[in-house]
Image (tube, rainbow, N blue to C red):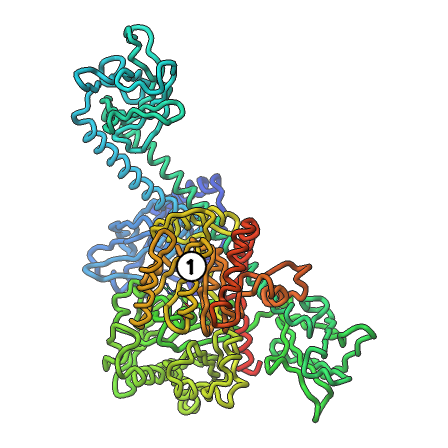
């Protein structure tokens, strides 16, 4: 909703004379609702409007600058009359029109559109029309139509006036939500009742008020006539044909439904020997008093003994008797059903709103915790008092040289600054006070943190001036966010240039990471844009329906057309060279991919130049957009695009190594997707002498996309609190899908993976055998691009086929969700793993990971028996797990042989068999750990600042 106030001449005049308003004079003065004053306002409005019809508009203007449009009363009132005047003389479209029509609506045209022919005020150029302002209005919008297609639209903006005493825009949104919900509820209720009516009519055909078999009546209504819906009827059943329960039994149960069991068994009613006039000499007739529900034209029932062990279901035909139902009842039922559905929908909506609010709060807490963990992890080198620096207050800084490269120095100096060194105030090198005996920390006090400081910055040194050595945290410097600053950190402008982005152009993990980093950085208050090629398949994408033209320019021997669209909340630009280069149905696969992507990278940079963008950071990914780094520094940096620095992320070291090497060379920072993997590949010839630029930042998972609490692919949504029930339901469904018979005490071990050598094929196969030998069940979702490997797995599936295995050779996203939820244990025995997502997804779904400790697996899974310290440090920045709690989250092994795997898997299975309660608590613990992008986003942010020298 626009709240802009146009400061035109006429608006000033309103203020001065308080008589008429110019277009779009949307003031914020008083949207207070008070029904008494609203109705008083309505009376005044009516009186004013009457008066205005008698007075000439010129007189009402009282000498003010002559407006094009004004209203009486000056401020429209919800639910009250309004007279709108327009000066035809001042509107080109109306000047010579034979008639003038007002076309109006409310609340930015969202409701109540109307058209009204206007009256001319004789002898003047004014026309007017009377309107009854909608009660739901907080604003009224209109345009004037002259002859033909001529419109007066207030310079294309349409006229928009505030309406007083209506709902606020927020209240209006709520009203509209209810309207939409009620429409939905009405439609659903009608469809249910119509279905019921049709079934009732159909079902009643051929059904009578008694049932005969072998020449005798076996059930009937006591009255001998069809029972009446909405009343209680005596229904008789003849015991002679089926003497359930023996002679002595005095009570049976009638299980009752209606209209062909349309809602299943709705009632259980006692059935007892009949007495009085319906009794017969053998006591064969039994009677039940059955409330017949409204709308029933057929009653269905079966009979059982009290224990529900012996049954009479009339040889599987059930018993059916006709009832009478009046036509009026359907309208009543419609209303009842509407109320029921409406209330259910409202409840669901409230629950959803609560869930969203809770989730937002959890997210905020998780983000705060991510920052806290970072500070804690730094605290063994540097900490402060207060813990979070406060503006306007002194700050005591503690520094422990023993854990740094200055451990040899006897003297330590602190140099400080604020706002990533951008603040005019700085702290000149200060000699820190050495620790007293038994202490480890040097200390000093910064007298006052400036009020507009949002960050405090430090480096430490062994001295001052030449020859001094520095601890600058490997080039990043130490930074602590402050509390209470009256200034905000300036946002960074980050521009990703990539050929994949989830979900619109997804081939692998690269696509997910581009979207996820982008969103996480944007969430932290920065401006993020993504530039992608415009592939042909975008034209059919429902996600890209809102594409808009952005610009076009001639370059590279063709015209480059650029469109834009928001994807997952990120502003994306699509580069479409008119030479057909990206008229492809897949991201990769043409034999000139390298050439096409190089062209794209240059065109993307050209787009930045042409639109005068100067991002702080260009972030490119893998070989396919590696060209950005070279082209930028060798060409564009000197030609108009001067500001950016280049970040380069390697998601996969195995492709396009020459291009990777080039980008590592030209980028200011290269990252790969986990710290351990960075360590493993730092020596790769691709990195060459650029090891110092190389950092590992682990990927995260999208905690909204992977959320068992909202996951549409699960039979029962769950969170850490009710995970036992949620996982039990998923387990049952997974067993059903896999054709496994199941017992609660059989653990299910699962694998979700591409089946390639990287993923430890021999260990996966071994684990299948081993799990079965330990009495467990084994399920696998995956497929092998290599036919030889696939054949091996086909053989394995054949060999192990039976009640305890399930092999799904497919890429099946919905099934993968069920696997994570249904498995007790997820196995990831990779030979190498840049980051790996499966182990993190498993944890979110409460499946315990068993992994080989390599790359990102090592950085995210901490062995319950051996890695309590490392877990506490990595998960919570804690140096004392005994006080802060056990944060281990899985089982890991080092070697690549089967015994190594057994070592981890056996301990996990033992834990499952021997102490189920502990195992369930471990599942809960892993669900509560945060493997989202919260922490990686902070690290990327740090990295971006570092590249900018801040
Ligand atoms: P990689 O990218 O090397 O395949 P990751 O662990 O990083 O391994 O990511 C694998 C992703 O692909 C996970 O989201 C996983 O759930 C998914 N996945 C792997 N195989 C399948 C499959 N057969 N069906 C559905 N999803 C799969």
Q: Report the residue at 44% width, 43% height from top.
A: 41
State which quarter of the image contains the C terminus. Answer: bottom right
Look at the numbered disc 1 and give the secondary structure of its residue. strand
Task: Please provide percent x and percent y for residue 748.
Answer: 44, 54
Q: Residues within 10 Å of mark 1 (few under 14, many from 20)?
A: many
Point out the residue furthest to the bottom here: 466
Task: Please provide percent x and percent y for residue 73.
Answer: 40, 49
Ligand 1 is found in the corner quadrant, namely bottom left
Comparing 360 with 548, the one in front is 360
Tell me where residue 86 sits by quadrant.
Answer: bottom left
Image position of 72 with respect to 506: above or below:
above
Comparing 479 with 768, the one in front is 768
* Residue on which disc 1 sits: 750
Task: Please provide percent x and percent y for residue 138.
Answer: 41, 50
State which quarter of the image contains the N terminus. Answer: bottom left
110 relative to 918 in the view: left or right: left
Comparing 492 with 737, the one in front is 737
Tell me where residue 337 sits by quadrant.
Answer: top left
Q: Report the residue at 53% width, 75% height from top.
A: 675
Image position of 173 with respect to 942: above or below:
above
Task: Please provide percent x and percent y for residue 579.
Answer: 23, 82
Image position of 626 with respect to 8: above or below:
below
Q: Report the residue at 29% width, 24% height from top.
A: 312
How many marks the image carries: the answer is: 1
Image position of 372 with respect to 99: above or below:
below
Q: Report the residue at 26% width, 49% height from top.
A: 116
Residue 373 shows up from this direction = yes
22 relative to 455 in the view: left or right: left
Point out the residue furthest to the right here: 437
Residue 158 shows up from this direction = no
Q: Is mark 1 within 8 Å of ligand 1?
A: no
């Amino acid at each position: 909703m626009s709240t802009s106030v146009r400061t035109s001449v006429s608006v000033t005049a309103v203020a001065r004379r308080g008589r008429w308003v110019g277009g779009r004079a949307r003031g914020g003065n008083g949207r207070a609702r008070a029904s008494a004053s609203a109705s008083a306002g309505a009376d005044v409005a009516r009186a004013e409007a009457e008066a205005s019809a008698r007075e000439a508009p010129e007189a009402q203007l009282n000498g003010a600058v002559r407006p094009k449009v004004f209203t009486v009363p000056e401020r429209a009132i919800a639910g009250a009359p309004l007279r709108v005047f327009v000066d035809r003389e001042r509107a080109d479209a109306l000047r010579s029109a034979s008639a003038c029509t007002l076309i109006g609506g409310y609340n930015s045209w969202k409701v109540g559109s109307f058209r009204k022919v206007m009256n001319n005020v004789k002898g003047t150029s004014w026309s007017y029309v009377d309107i009854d302002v909608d009660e739901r209005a907080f604003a009224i919008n209109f345009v004037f139509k002259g002859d033909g297609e001529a419109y007066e639209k207030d310079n294309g903006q349409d006229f928009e006036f505030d309406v007083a005493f209506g709902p606020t825009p927020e209240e209006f949104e709520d009203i509209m939500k209810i309207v939409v919900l009620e429409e939905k509820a009405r439609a659903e209720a009608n469809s249910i009742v119509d279905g019921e009516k049709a079934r009732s009519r159909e079902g009643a055909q051929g059904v009578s008020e008694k049932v005969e078999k072998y020449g005798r009546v076996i059930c009937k209504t006591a009255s001998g006539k069809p029972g009446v819906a909405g009343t209680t009827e005596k229904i008789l059943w003849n015991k002679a044909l089926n003497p359930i329960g023996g002679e002595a039994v005095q009570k049976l149960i009638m299980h009752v439904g209606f209209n062909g069991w349309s809602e299943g068994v709705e009632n259980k009613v006692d059935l007892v020997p009949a007495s009085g006039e319906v009794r017969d000499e053998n006591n064969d007739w039994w009677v039940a008093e059955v409330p017949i529900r409204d709308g029933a034209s057929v009653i269905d029932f079966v009979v059982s003994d009290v224990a529900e062990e012996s049954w009479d279901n009339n040889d599987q035909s059930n018993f059916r008797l006709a009832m009478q139902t009046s036509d009026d009842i359907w309208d009543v039922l419609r209303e009842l059903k509407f109320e029921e559905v409406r209330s259910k929908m409202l409840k669901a909506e409230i629950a959803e709103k609560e869930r969203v609010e809770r989730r937002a709060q959890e997210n905020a807490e998780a983000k705060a915790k991510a920052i806290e963990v970072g500070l804690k992890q730094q605290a063994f080198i540097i900490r402060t008092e207060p813990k979070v620096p406060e503006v306007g207050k002194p700050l005591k800084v503690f520094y422990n040289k023993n854990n740094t490269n200055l451990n040899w120095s006897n003297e330590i100096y602190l140099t400080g600054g604020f706002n990533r060194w951008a603040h005019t105030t700085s702290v000149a090198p200060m000699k820190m006070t050495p620790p007293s005996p038994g202490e480890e920390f040097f200390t000093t006090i910064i007298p006052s943190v400036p009020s507009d400081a949002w960050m405090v910055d430090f480096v430490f040194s062994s001295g001052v001036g030449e020859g001094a050595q520095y601890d600058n945290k490997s080039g990043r410097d130490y930074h602590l966010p402050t509390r209470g600053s009256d200034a905000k950190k300036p946002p960074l402008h980050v521009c990703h240039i990539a050929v994949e982005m989830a979900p619109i152009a997804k081939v692998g993990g690269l696509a997910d990471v581009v979207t996820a980093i982008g969103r996480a950085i944007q969430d932290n208050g920065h401006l993020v844009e993504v530039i992608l090629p415009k592939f042909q398949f975008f034209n059919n994408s429902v996600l890209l329906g809102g594409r808009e033209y952005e610009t076009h320019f001639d370059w590279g021997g063709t015209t480059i057309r650029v469109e834009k669209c928001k994807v997952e909340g990120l502003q994306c630009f699509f580069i479409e060279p008119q030479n057909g280069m990206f008229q492809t149905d897949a991201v990769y696969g043409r034999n000139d991919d390298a050439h096409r992507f190089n062209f794209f990278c240059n065109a993307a940079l050209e787009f930045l130049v042409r639109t005068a963008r100067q991002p702080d950071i260009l972030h490119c990914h893998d070989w396919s957009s590696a060209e950005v780094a070279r082209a930028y520094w060798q060409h564009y940096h000197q030609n108009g695009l001067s500001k950016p620095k280049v970040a380069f992320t390697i998601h996969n070291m195995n492709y396009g190594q020459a291009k990777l090497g080039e980008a590592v060379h030209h980028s200011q920072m290269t990252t790969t997707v986990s710290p351990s993997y960075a360590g493993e590949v730092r020596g790769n010839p691709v990195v060459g002498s650029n090891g110092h630029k190389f950092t590992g930042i682990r990927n995260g998972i999208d905690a909204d996309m992977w959320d068992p609490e909202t996951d549409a692919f699960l039979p029962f949504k769950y969170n850490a609190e009710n995970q036992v029930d949620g996982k039990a339901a998923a387990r049952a469904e997974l067993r059903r899908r896999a054709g496994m018979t199941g017992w609660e005490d059989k653990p299910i071990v699962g694998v979700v993976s591409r089946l390639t050598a990287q993923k430890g094929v021999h260990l996966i196969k071994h684990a299948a055998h081993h799990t079965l030998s330990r009495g467990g069940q084994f399920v696998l979702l995956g497929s092998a691009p290599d036919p030889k490997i696939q054949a091996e797995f086909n053989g394995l599936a054949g060999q192990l086929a039976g009640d305890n295995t399930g092999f799904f050779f497919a890429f099946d996203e919905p099934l993968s969700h069920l696997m994570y939820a249904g498995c007790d244990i997820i196995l990831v025995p990779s030979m190498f793993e840049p980051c790996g997502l499966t182990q993190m997804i498993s944890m979110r779904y409460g499946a315990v990971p068993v992994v080989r400790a390599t790359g990102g697996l090592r950085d995210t899974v901490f062995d319950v028996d051996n890695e309590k310290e490392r877990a506490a440090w990595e998960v919570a920045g804690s140096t004392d797990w005994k006080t802060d709690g056990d944060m281990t989250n899985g089982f890991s092994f080092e070697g690549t042989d089967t015994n190594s795997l057994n070592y981890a898997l056996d301990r996990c299975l033992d834990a499952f068999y021997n102490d189920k309660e502990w195992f369930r608590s471990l599942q809960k613990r892993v669900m509560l750990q945060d493997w989202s992008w919260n922490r990686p986003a902070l690290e990327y942010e740090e990295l971006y600042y570092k590249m900018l020298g801040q």
